[in-house]
Amino acid sequence: MSNKQSNLSKVSSAEAVLLGALAPGVNGPTWTTLKSTFLMLGVCLAVLLGLAFSSSDSSLILHVGFLVLIAVSLFMLLSWFLAQTGLVSVEHQMREMDMVPNDQQRSKKSE
């Protein structure tokens, strides 16, 4: 039992994000990475919007405004989806992908 918990506690954030990309469900580190990515996207789009306003080009303001609308709606939809489904633990994802031997596999090995 302690060996199983020691294997699960050794999972780094990068491995958890990679595991979240491959396994069903979204784990905490993957959601944190997505939020920080959307934050950086928001900063970039805010700078672009500021530059568009300073150039006084109405078509550029319209295009960047549309990109901001797309990014905000995507983030809101992802947040709503995760509120409906919930987060999955990294341990659960590891069990789903058979990366951690379950009790039945251990009992077969011991026999």
Image (spheres, helix red, strand yellow):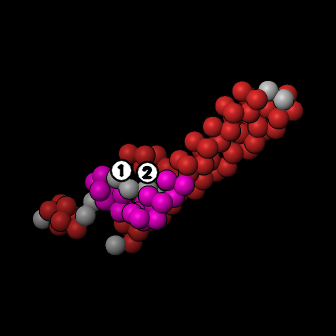
**Separation of disc 1 and disc 2 at Cα?**
5 Å
The residue shown at (12%, 65%) is 111
Q: Image check: 95 left or right of 46?
A: left
Residue 85's label in the rendered image is none
- The residue tagged 1 is 23
The one nearer the camera, 35 or 54, is 54
Residue ranking furthest to the front: 58
What is the quadrant of residue 58 in the picture? top right
- The residue tagged 2 is 20
Q: Circle 1 sits in a helix, a strand or a loop, which is it? A: loop
The residue shown at (29%, 56%) is 96
Residue ranking furthest to the right: 54
Name the spot of residue 82 as percent of width and height, x first.
45, 60
The one nearer the camera, 93 or 34, is 34
Name the spot of residue 21 as percent of width and height, x first.
43, 46
Q: Main secondary structure of the magenta part?
A: helix
Q: Which amino acid type is shown beneath numbered disc 2? A: Gly
The magenta-colored residue range is 76-98
Instruction: Indicate yes or no whether the magenta region holds residue 94.
Output: yes
Give the class, few, some or many, for how many residues have Cα within 10 Å of label 2's Cα (few <14, many ≥20): many
Q: Circle 2 sits in a helix, a strand or a loop, which is it? A: helix
Proximity of marks 1 and 2: CB atoms separated by less than 8 Å: yes
Give the class, few, some or many, for how many residues have Cα within 10 Å of label 1's Cα (few <14, many ≥20): some
Name the spot of residue 80 as percent of width and height, x first.
48, 60
Q: Is residue 89 visible?
A: no
Answer above or below: position of 73 versus 87: above
